[in-house]
Protein backbone atom coordinates (compact mmCIF):
# COMPACT_ATOMS: atom_id res chain seq x y z
CA UNK A 1 0.00 0.00 0.00
CA UNK A 2 0.98 3.44 -0.62
CA UNK A 3 0.85 5.87 1.95
CA UNK A 4 2.16 6.96 6.47
CA UNK A 5 5.30 9.12 14.76
CA UNK A 6 8.07 13.38 25.04
CA UNK A 7 7.93 16.37 26.87
CA UNK A 8 5.19 18.71 28.12
CA UNK A 9 2.14 19.89 26.16
CA UNK A 10 3.79 19.92 22.73
CA UNK A 11 2.49 17.99 19.74
CA UNK A 12 5.04 15.39 18.73
CA UNK A 13 7.78 17.89 19.38
CA UNK A 14 9.99 19.79 21.73
CA UNK A 15 8.18 23.08 22.16
CA UNK A 16 9.51 26.62 22.42
CA UNK A 17 9.28 26.82 26.17
CA UNK A 18 10.50 23.33 26.90
CA UNK A 19 13.17 23.12 29.56
CA UNK A 20 14.44 19.69 28.54
CA UNK A 21 14.23 17.27 25.62
CA UNK A 22 10.83 15.81 24.82
CA UNK A 23 12.20 12.30 24.62
CA UNK A 24 11.70 11.47 28.23
CA UNK A 25 15.45 11.43 28.88
CA UNK A 26 16.89 9.72 25.80
CA UNK A 27 20.56 9.30 26.69
CA UNK A 28 23.09 11.43 24.90
CA UNK A 29 20.72 12.56 22.18
CA UNK A 30 21.83 16.09 21.50
CA UNK A 31 19.24 16.53 18.75
CA UNK A 32 16.52 17.23 21.32
CA UNK A 33 18.65 19.80 23.12
CA UNK A 34 19.41 21.52 19.85
CA UNK A 35 15.73 21.71 18.98
CA UNK A 36 14.95 23.37 22.28
CA UNK A 37 17.82 25.82 22.14
CA UNK A 38 17.16 27.00 18.61
CA UNK A 39 13.48 27.88 18.92
CA UNK A 40 12.98 31.36 20.39
CA UNK A 41 9.96 31.57 22.65
CA UNK A 42 8.71 34.65 20.82
CA UNK A 43 8.83 32.95 17.42
CA UNK A 44 5.25 31.99 16.63
CA UNK A 45 5.57 31.75 12.85
CA UNK A 46 3.55 28.88 11.45
CA UNK A 47 3.99 29.33 7.68
CA UNK A 48 5.96 27.34 5.15
CA UNK A 49 8.83 29.85 5.27
CA UNK A 50 9.34 29.09 8.96
CA UNK A 51 9.41 25.35 8.28
CA UNK A 52 11.87 25.61 5.40
CA UNK A 53 14.23 28.07 7.10
CA UNK A 54 17.18 27.10 9.31
CA UNK A 55 17.38 24.92 11.27
CA UNK A 56 14.15 23.16 10.29
CA UNK A 57 14.72 22.89 6.55
CA UNK A 58 17.63 20.45 6.79
CA UNK A 59 15.86 18.44 9.46
CA UNK A 60 12.76 18.24 7.29
CA UNK A 61 14.84 16.94 4.39
CA UNK A 62 16.39 14.22 6.56
CA UNK A 63 13.09 13.06 8.04
CA UNK A 64 11.46 13.17 4.62
CA UNK A 65 14.24 11.01 3.17
CA UNK A 66 13.51 8.28 5.73
CA UNK A 67 9.76 8.44 5.46
CA UNK A 68 10.02 8.71 1.68
CA UNK A 69 12.11 5.54 1.60
CA UNK A 70 9.35 3.76 3.52
CA UNK A 71 6.70 5.15 1.17
CA UNK A 72 8.65 4.31 -1.97
CA UNK A 73 9.38 0.81 -0.71
CA UNK A 74 5.69 0.06 -0.33
CA UNK A 75 4.35 1.50 -3.57
CA UNK A 76 7.23 0.68 -5.96
CA UNK A 77 7.09 -3.03 -5.19
CA UNK A 78 3.30 -3.31 -5.44
CA UNK A 79 3.18 -4.05 -9.21
CA UNK A 80 6.30 -6.26 -8.96
CA UNK A 81 5.53 -8.76 -6.20
CA UNK A 82 2.62 -10.58 -7.91
CA UNK A 83 4.76 -11.18 -11.00
CA UNK A 84 7.79 -12.21 -8.93
CA UNK A 85 5.83 -14.71 -6.85
CA UNK A 86 4.14 -16.06 -9.97
CA UNK A 87 7.53 -16.53 -11.68
CA UNK A 88 8.87 -18.41 -8.65
CA UNK A 89 5.79 -20.61 -8.42
CA UNK A 90 4.67 -19.12 -5.13
CA UNK A 91 1.48 -17.24 -5.99
CA UNK A 92 -0.33 -18.93 -3.09
CA UNK A 93 2.15 -17.19 -0.77
CA UNK A 94 1.29 -13.71 -2.10
CA UNK A 95 -0.79 -12.64 0.94
CA UNK A 96 1.87 -14.04 3.28
CA UNK A 97 4.67 -12.00 1.74
CA UNK A 98 2.67 -8.90 2.60
CA UNK A 99 1.93 -10.25 6.08
CA UNK A 100 5.61 -11.07 6.69
CA UNK A 101 6.75 -7.66 5.50
CA UNK A 102 4.24 -5.73 7.58
CA UNK A 103 4.79 -7.92 10.65
CA UNK A 104 8.49 -7.08 10.58
CA UNK A 105 7.66 -3.41 10.02
CA UNK A 106 5.70 -3.61 13.28
CA UNK A 107 8.61 -5.37 14.99
CA UNK A 108 10.82 -2.52 13.85
CA UNK A 109 8.40 0.01 15.28
CA UNK A 110 8.22 -1.81 18.61
CA UNK A 111 11.99 -1.96 18.95
CA UNK A 112 12.80 1.50 17.55
CA UNK A 113 12.61 3.40 20.85
CA UNK A 114 14.97 1.06 22.78
CA UNK A 115 17.24 0.94 19.71
CA UNK A 116 17.47 4.71 19.76
CA UNK A 117 18.11 4.72 23.50
CA UNK A 118 20.93 2.23 23.02
CA UNK A 119 22.66 3.69 19.96
CA UNK A 120 21.21 7.18 19.45
CA UNK A 121 19.09 8.26 16.50
CA UNK A 122 21.96 8.78 14.06
CA UNK A 123 23.67 5.42 14.50
CA UNK A 124 20.38 3.54 14.73
CA UNK A 125 19.26 4.97 11.40
CA UNK A 126 22.54 4.07 9.73
CA UNK A 127 22.23 0.51 11.06
CA UNK A 128 18.68 0.30 9.71
CA UNK A 129 19.86 1.54 6.31
CA UNK A 130 22.51 -1.19 6.12
CA UNK A 131 19.94 -3.87 6.99
CA UNK A 132 17.68 -2.44 4.29
CA UNK A 133 20.48 -3.01 1.76
CA UNK A 134 20.82 -6.63 2.89
CA UNK A 135 17.08 -7.14 2.42
CA UNK A 136 17.28 -5.88 -1.16
CA UNK A 137 20.21 -8.20 -1.91
CA UNK A 138 18.34 -11.21 -0.54
CA UNK A 139 15.29 -10.48 -2.67
CA UNK A 140 17.12 -9.79 -5.89
CA UNK A 141 19.08 -13.06 -5.62
CA UNK A 142 16.22 -15.21 -4.24
CA UNK A 143 16.01 -18.61 -6.03
CA UNK A 144 12.61 -19.48 -4.50
CA UNK A 145 9.44 -17.83 -3.30
CA UNK A 146 10.25 -18.64 0.34
CA UNK A 147 13.63 -16.92 0.15
CA UNK A 148 12.03 -13.93 -1.54
CA UNK A 149 9.58 -13.80 1.36
CA UNK A 150 12.50 -13.95 3.83
CA UNK A 151 14.31 -11.10 2.10
CA UNK A 152 11.16 -9.02 2.12
CA UNK A 153 10.78 -9.69 5.85
CA UNK A 154 14.36 -8.53 6.52
CA UNK A 155 13.68 -5.38 4.54
CA UNK A 156 10.48 -4.92 6.53
CA UNK A 157 12.40 -4.85 9.84
CA UNK A 158 14.77 -2.22 8.50
CA UNK A 159 11.85 -0.28 7.04
CA UNK A 160 10.06 -0.34 10.40
CA UNK A 161 13.13 0.99 12.20
CA UNK A 162 13.64 3.78 9.68
CA UNK A 163 10.09 5.11 9.60
CA UNK A 164 9.59 4.78 13.38
CA UNK A 165 12.86 6.54 14.16
CA UNK A 166 11.93 9.33 11.76
CA UNK A 167 8.63 9.75 13.60
CA UNK A 168 10.49 10.05 16.91
CA UNK A 169 12.64 12.75 15.32
CA UNK A 170 9.52 14.73 14.52
CA UNK A 171 8.87 14.64 18.27
CA UNK A 172 12.26 16.27 18.88
CA UNK A 173 13.05 18.48 15.92
CA UNK A 174 9.91 20.55 15.30
CA UNK A 175 7.73 22.76 17.53
CA UNK A 176 4.01 22.03 17.72
CA UNK A 177 3.12 25.07 15.62
CA UNK A 178 4.90 23.51 12.63
CA UNK A 179 3.79 19.90 13.07
CA UNK A 180 0.67 20.11 10.83
CA UNK A 181 2.84 21.40 8.01
CA UNK A 182 5.42 18.67 8.65
CA UNK A 183 2.69 16.07 8.14
CA UNK A 184 1.56 17.92 5.02
CA UNK A 185 5.11 17.82 3.71
CA UNK A 186 5.27 14.10 4.30
CA UNK A 187 2.04 13.80 2.32
CA UNK A 188 3.84 15.49 -0.57
CA UNK A 189 6.69 13.00 -0.10
CA UNK A 190 4.10 10.24 -0.40
CA UNK A 191 2.84 11.89 -3.60
CA UNK A 192 6.31 11.88 -5.12
CA UNK A 193 6.84 8.27 -4.06
CA UNK A 194 3.40 7.40 -5.42
CA UNK A 195 4.16 8.93 -8.80
CA UNK A 196 7.68 7.59 -9.18
CA UNK A 197 7.37 4.30 -7.28
CA UNK A 198 4.75 2.22 -9.11
CA UNK A 199 5.75 3.72 -12.45
CA UNK A 200 9.44 2.94 -11.85
CA UNK A 201 8.66 -0.54 -10.56
CA UNK A 202 6.30 -1.32 -13.43
CA UNK A 203 8.66 0.14 -16.04
CA UNK A 204 11.70 -1.82 -14.80
CA UNK A 205 9.82 -5.10 -14.47
CA UNK A 206 8.33 -4.67 -17.94
CA UNK A 207 11.66 -4.01 -19.65
CA UNK A 208 14.27 -5.68 -17.43
CA UNK A 209 12.42 -8.26 -15.34
CA UNK A 210 11.25 -8.52 -11.77
CA UNK A 211 14.67 -9.00 -10.13
CA UNK A 212 16.05 -5.55 -11.06
CA UNK A 213 12.65 -4.06 -10.22
CA UNK A 214 13.02 -5.19 -6.60
CA UNK A 215 16.00 -2.85 -6.23
CA UNK A 216 14.43 0.35 -7.59
CA UNK A 217 14.60 2.03 -4.16
CA UNK A 218 18.42 2.09 -4.18
CA UNK A 219 18.70 5.74 -5.41
CA UNK A 220 16.44 6.93 -2.60
CA UNK A 221 18.41 4.82 -0.13
CA UNK A 222 21.55 6.63 -1.27
CA UNK A 223 19.84 9.97 -0.58
CA UNK A 224 18.89 8.71 2.87
CA UNK A 225 22.54 7.89 3.68
CA UNK A 226 23.62 11.34 2.46
CA UNK A 227 20.97 13.39 4.27
CA UNK A 228 20.89 11.86 7.75
CA UNK A 229 24.50 12.43 8.86
CA UNK A 230 24.32 16.13 7.97
CA UNK A 231 20.99 16.74 9.71
CA UNK A 232 21.69 14.75 12.87
CA UNK A 233 24.78 15.42 14.98
CA UNK A 234 26.82 12.56 16.38
CA UNK A 235 25.49 11.70 19.83
CA UNK A 236 27.64 12.12 22.88
CA UNK A 237 27.77 10.00 26.02
CA UNK A 238 24.64 9.64 28.10
CA UNK A 239 24.17 12.40 30.68
CA UNK A 240 20.71 11.44 31.87
CA UNK A 241 19.45 8.21 33.37
CA UNK A 242 17.63 5.71 31.21
CA UNK A 243 13.85 5.76 31.39
CA UNK A 244 12.30 2.30 31.81
CA UNK A 245 10.94 1.24 28.45
CA UNK A 246 7.45 -0.13 27.98
CA UNK A 247 6.84 -2.23 24.90
CA UNK A 248 3.38 -0.70 24.51
CA UNK A 249 2.47 2.71 25.95
CA UNK A 250 -0.55 2.95 28.23
CA UNK A 251 -4.06 3.48 26.80
CA UNK A 252 -3.12 2.20 23.34
CA UNK A 253 -6.19 0.46 21.86
CA UNK A 254 -8.33 1.56 24.76
CA UNK A 255 -11.87 2.89 24.37
CA UNK A 256 -11.98 6.00 26.57
CA UNK A 257 -9.19 8.26 25.28
CA UNK A 258 -7.90 9.83 22.09
CA UNK A 259 -4.81 7.59 22.24
CA UNK A 260 -6.99 4.48 22.37
CA UNK A 261 -9.68 5.45 19.90
CA UNK A 262 -7.18 7.06 17.55
CA UNK A 263 -5.12 3.87 17.43
CA UNK A 264 -8.26 1.88 16.60
CA UNK A 265 -9.08 4.38 13.87
CA UNK A 266 -5.69 3.96 12.18
CA UNK A 267 -5.76 0.17 12.57
CA UNK A 268 -9.24 -0.23 11.12
CA UNK A 269 -8.67 2.00 8.12
CA UNK A 270 -5.42 0.31 7.12
CA UNK A 271 -6.91 -3.12 7.82
CA UNK A 272 -9.73 -2.41 5.40
CA UNK A 273 -7.38 -1.05 2.76
CA UNK A 274 -5.40 -4.32 2.90
CA UNK A 275 -7.85 -5.93 0.44
CA UNK A 276 -6.64 -3.54 -2.26
CA UNK A 277 -3.04 -3.81 -1.09
CA UNK A 278 -3.03 -7.59 -1.64
CA UNK A 279 -5.38 -8.11 -4.58
CA UNK A 280 -5.88 -4.88 -6.53
CA UNK A 281 -2.68 -5.09 -8.62
CA UNK A 282 -3.27 -8.76 -9.42
CA UNK A 283 -6.92 -8.21 -10.34
CA UNK A 284 -6.14 -5.19 -12.52
CA UNK A 285 -3.50 -7.16 -14.40
CA UNK A 286 -5.61 -10.27 -15.01
CA UNK A 287 -9.17 -8.93 -14.95
CA UNK A 288 -8.70 -5.66 -16.85
CA UNK A 289 -5.63 -6.86 -18.82
CA UNK A 290 -3.48 -3.89 -17.74
CA UNK A 291 0.29 -3.94 -18.21
CA UNK A 292 2.60 -3.59 -15.17
CA UNK A 293 3.18 0.09 -15.96
CA UNK A 294 -0.57 0.71 -16.29
CA UNK A 295 -1.20 -1.12 -13.01
CA UNK A 296 1.39 1.10 -11.35
CA UNK A 297 -0.31 4.21 -12.68
CA UNK A 298 -3.65 3.08 -11.26
CA UNK A 299 -2.06 2.45 -7.88
CA UNK A 300 -0.61 5.96 -7.97
CA UNK A 301 -4.04 7.57 -7.79
CA UNK A 302 -4.58 6.68 -4.12
CA UNK A 303 -1.33 8.15 -2.83
CA UNK A 304 -1.56 11.12 -5.16
CA UNK A 305 -5.07 12.03 -4.06
CA UNK A 306 -3.99 11.49 -0.44
CA UNK A 307 -1.17 13.97 -0.88
CA UNK A 308 -3.16 16.54 -2.84
CA UNK A 309 -5.90 16.55 -0.20
CA UNK A 310 -3.52 16.49 2.77
CA UNK A 311 -1.71 19.64 1.68
CA UNK A 312 -4.61 22.09 2.23
CA UNK A 313 -5.86 20.12 5.26
CA UNK A 314 -2.47 20.54 6.93
CA UNK A 315 -2.72 24.29 6.40
CA UNK A 316 -5.97 24.58 8.37
CA UNK A 317 -5.08 26.31 11.63
CA UNK A 318 -8.17 25.69 13.74
CA UNK A 319 -8.28 22.36 15.54
CA UNK A 320 -12.08 22.33 15.38
CA UNK A 321 -12.18 22.31 11.57
CA UNK A 322 -9.48 19.66 11.26
CA UNK A 323 -11.28 17.52 13.83
CA UNK A 324 -14.54 17.80 11.90
CA UNK A 325 -12.79 16.72 8.70
CA UNK A 326 -11.15 13.80 10.52
CA UNK A 327 -14.47 12.50 11.81
CA UNK A 328 -16.07 12.21 8.38
CA UNK A 329 -12.94 10.86 6.65
CA UNK A 330 -13.83 7.14 6.93
CA UNK A 331 -17.06 7.79 5.01
CA UNK A 332 -14.93 8.58 1.97
CA UNK A 333 -13.30 5.17 2.34
CA UNK A 334 -16.68 3.45 2.40
CA UNK A 335 -17.67 5.10 -0.87
CA UNK A 336 -14.24 4.49 -2.40
CA UNK A 337 -14.33 0.75 -1.67
CA UNK A 338 -17.80 0.49 -3.24
CA UNK A 339 -16.57 2.17 -6.43
CA UNK A 340 -13.47 -0.03 -6.67
CA UNK A 341 -15.55 -3.19 -6.27
CA UNK A 342 -18.03 -2.14 -8.95
CA UNK A 343 -15.26 -1.05 -11.28
CA UNK A 344 -13.48 -4.40 -11.00
CA UNK A 345 -16.69 -6.42 -11.33
CA UNK A 346 -17.97 -4.61 -14.41
CA UNK A 347 -14.52 -4.00 -15.90
CA UNK A 348 -14.85 -0.20 -15.72
CA UNK A 349 -11.47 1.38 -15.03
CA UNK A 350 -12.88 4.92 -14.42
CA UNK A 351 -14.85 3.58 -11.44
CA UNK A 352 -11.69 2.00 -10.00
CA UNK A 353 -9.84 5.29 -10.41
CA UNK A 354 -12.64 7.24 -8.74
CA UNK A 355 -12.63 4.80 -5.85
CA UNK A 356 -8.88 5.12 -5.47
CA UNK A 357 -9.21 8.91 -5.33
CA UNK A 358 -11.85 8.70 -2.60
CA UNK A 359 -9.75 6.23 -0.62
CA UNK A 360 -6.75 8.53 -0.82
CA UNK A 361 -8.83 11.49 0.29
CA UNK A 362 -10.05 9.46 3.26
CA UNK A 363 -6.51 8.83 4.48
CA UNK A 364 -5.63 12.50 3.96
CA UNK A 365 -8.59 13.57 6.08
CA UNK A 366 -7.66 11.22 8.91
CA UNK A 367 -4.03 10.19 9.22
CA UNK A 368 -2.17 13.46 9.81
CA UNK A 369 -4.71 14.84 12.27
CA UNK A 370 -5.19 11.51 14.05
CA UNK A 371 -1.44 11.04 14.45
CA UNK A 372 -1.07 14.51 15.91
CA UNK A 373 -4.04 13.99 18.25
CA UNK A 374 -2.63 10.69 19.53
CA UNK A 375 0.77 12.19 20.29
CA UNK A 376 -0.82 15.21 21.99
CA UNK A 377 -2.89 12.97 24.21
CA UNK A 378 -0.05 10.57 25.12
CA UNK A 379 1.45 10.71 28.61
CA UNK A 380 4.57 12.93 28.49
CA UNK A 381 6.87 10.16 29.72
CA UNK A 382 5.56 7.79 27.03
CA UNK A 383 5.34 10.27 24.17
CA UNK A 384 8.45 9.08 22.35
CA UNK A 385 7.35 5.43 22.50
CA UNK A 386 3.89 6.41 21.27
CA UNK A 387 5.40 8.40 18.38
CA UNK A 388 7.62 5.48 17.39
CA UNK A 389 4.69 3.06 17.45
CA UNK A 390 2.37 5.06 15.18
CA UNK A 391 3.71 3.50 11.96
CA UNK A 392 3.38 0.07 13.58
CA UNK A 393 -0.21 0.76 14.57
CA UNK A 394 -1.00 1.74 11.01
CA UNK A 395 0.86 -1.27 9.65
CA UNK A 396 -0.89 -3.60 12.09
CA UNK A 397 -4.02 -3.35 10.01
CA UNK A 398 -2.16 -4.61 6.96
CA UNK A 399 -0.73 -7.54 8.92
CA UNK A 400 -4.13 -8.59 10.25
CA UNK A 401 -5.76 -8.18 6.86
CA UNK A 402 -3.01 -9.90 4.89
CA UNK A 403 -2.88 -12.79 7.35
CA UNK A 404 -6.63 -13.25 7.11
CA UNK A 405 -6.55 -13.13 3.31
CA UNK A 406 -3.62 -15.54 3.29
CA UNK A 407 -5.70 -17.99 5.31
CA UNK A 408 -8.94 -17.78 3.33
CA UNK A 409 -7.37 -17.22 -0.10
CA UNK A 410 -6.41 -20.86 -0.79
CA UNK A 411 -9.71 -22.10 0.66
CA UNK A 412 -11.71 -20.13 -1.90
CA UNK A 413 -9.08 -20.06 -4.68
CA UNK A 414 -9.36 -16.27 -4.63
CA UNK A 415 -6.68 -15.29 -7.17
CA UNK A 416 -8.16 -17.47 -9.93
CA UNK A 417 -11.72 -16.43 -9.18
CA UNK A 418 -10.89 -12.73 -9.07
CA UNK A 419 -9.50 -13.03 -12.60
CA UNK A 420 -12.30 -15.25 -13.90
CA UNK A 421 -14.84 -14.55 -16.62
CA UNK A 422 -17.63 -13.98 -15.87
CA UNK A 423 -16.45 -12.04 -12.80
CA UNK A 424 -17.04 -13.69 -9.46
CA UNK A 425 -19.25 -11.94 -6.89
CA UNK A 426 -16.43 -12.53 -4.39
CA UNK A 427 -15.13 -9.15 -5.56
CA UNK A 428 -18.01 -7.55 -3.65
CA UNK A 429 -17.42 -9.78 -0.62
CA UNK A 430 -13.76 -8.80 -0.42
CA UNK A 431 -14.19 -5.06 -0.87
CA UNK A 432 -17.26 -5.28 1.34
CA UNK A 433 -14.82 -6.07 4.16
CA UNK A 434 -13.17 -2.71 3.44
CA UNK A 435 -16.53 -0.98 3.64
CA UNK A 436 -17.36 -2.68 6.95
CA UNK A 437 -14.05 -1.77 8.57
CA UNK A 438 -14.33 1.80 7.29
CA UNK A 439 -17.80 2.01 8.85
CA UNK A 440 -16.31 0.90 12.18
CA UNK A 441 -13.65 3.57 11.72
CA UNK A 442 -16.41 6.18 11.67
CA UNK A 443 -17.32 5.14 15.21
CA UNK A 444 -13.71 5.28 16.40
CA UNK A 445 -13.22 8.71 14.83
CA UNK A 446 -15.96 10.18 17.00
CA UNK A 447 -13.72 9.79 20.07
CA UNK A 448 -10.61 11.47 18.64
CA UNK A 449 -10.06 15.02 19.88
CA UNK A 450 -7.46 17.51 18.65
CA UNK A 451 -6.14 20.03 21.15
CA UNK A 452 -5.93 23.70 20.18
CA UNK A 453 -2.36 24.91 19.45
CA UNK A 454 -0.52 25.70 22.67
CA UNK A 455 -3.05 23.87 24.85
Image (tube, rainbow, N blue to C red):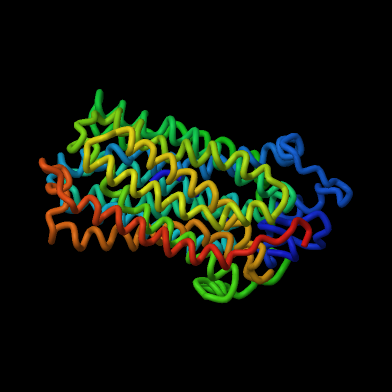
Number of numbered markers: 0
Query: Image quadrant of residue 297?
Result: top left
Question: Is residue 134 at all visible to an observer of this figure?
Answer: yes
Q: Is residue 432 above or below residue 317?
A: below
Going by the image, does 113 lie left or right of 28? Answer: left
Q: Residue at x 77, y 62 (%)?
A: 455
Q: Residue at x 53, y 49 (%)?
A: 125
Q: Nearer the viewer, residue 95 or 342?
A: 342
Q: Position of residue 454 (x, y in %)?
A: 78, 58
Going by the image, does 302 lie left or right of 368? Answer: left
Q: Nearer the viewer, residue 262 or 41?
A: 262
Q: Position of residue 146 (x, y in %)?
A: 20, 52
Q: Residue at x 57, y 63 (%)?
A: 118
Q: Residue at x 89, y 49 (%)?
A: 42
Q: Is residue 86 above or below residue 432?
A: above
Q: Position of residue 186 (x, y in %)?
A: 57, 42
* Residue found at the very far top of the displayed protein: 207
Question: Is residue 123 at all visible to an observer of this figure?
Answer: no
Going by the image, does 208 lie left or right of 71? Answer: left
Query: Image quadrant of residue 229?
Result: top right
Going by the image, does 400 lie left or right of 374? Answer: left
Q: Position of residue 381 (x, y in %)?
A: 67, 71
Amino acid sequence: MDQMTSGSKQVATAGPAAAKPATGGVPGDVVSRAAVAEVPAADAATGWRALLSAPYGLRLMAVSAGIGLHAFNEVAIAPVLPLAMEALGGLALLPFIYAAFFTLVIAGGLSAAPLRRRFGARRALMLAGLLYCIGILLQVSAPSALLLLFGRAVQGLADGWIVALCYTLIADLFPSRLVPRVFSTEAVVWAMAAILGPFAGGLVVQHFGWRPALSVSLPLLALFFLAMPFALPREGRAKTPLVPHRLLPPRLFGFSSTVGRGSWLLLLMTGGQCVSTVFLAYTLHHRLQLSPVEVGLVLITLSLSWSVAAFPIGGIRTAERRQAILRIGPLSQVLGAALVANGLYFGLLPLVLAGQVLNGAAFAMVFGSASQAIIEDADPEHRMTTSALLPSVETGGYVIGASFLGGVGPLFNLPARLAAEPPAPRIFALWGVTMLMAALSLVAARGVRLKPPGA
